Image (cartoon, helix red, strand yellow):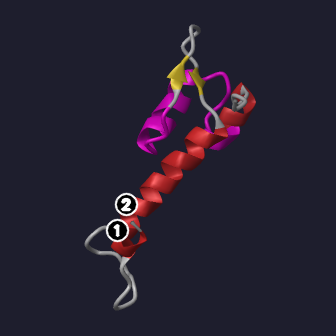
Amino acid sequence: MSKLLTKQEIGRLTGAPASSARAQMEVLDANRIPYVRRKDGSPALTWEMVNQATLTRNTSKRTSAGANLPTGFNLDAIN
């Protein structure tokens, strides 16, 4: 099981103060990073959630129509 990030770690990740849950959630939402809202209203997340969101975002950029892939490079062949 993954360990939840501390409020300070979330603050460093988002650049928003640990005391401002609303600002942190705005940054997380803007970057499409999922989180769970704690009873006190602050976001709770793990590094796996951050990494998966980043991986998903980067993969969708690479496979988009405007991707800068070398000629003959076929990502569909991975499946």
Is the C-beta separation of discs 1 and 2 under 8 Å? yes
Picture layout, residue 73 above or below residue 24: below
Magenta stretch encompasses residue 15: yes
Q: Residue 7 or 60: which is nearer the viewer?
A: 60
Query: Mark 1 is on which residue type?
Result: Thr
Residue 36 x/y as whole percent: 52, 23
Residue sitting at 49 percent across and 40 percent down?
33
Which dot marks residue 63?
1
Q: Is residue 37 above or below residue 76?
A: above
The residues colored magenta run 12-34
Measured as percent of width and height from the top left, residue 6 is found at 73, 28
Indicate the position of residue 76 as horizontal and vertical percent values.
34, 71
Which label is found at residue 60? 2
Quadrant for the N terminus in the image = top right
User: In the rendered image of this protein, does residue 15 appear above or below residue 36?
Assistant: below
- Nearest to the observer: residue 51 or residue 14: 51
Outermost bottom residue: 71
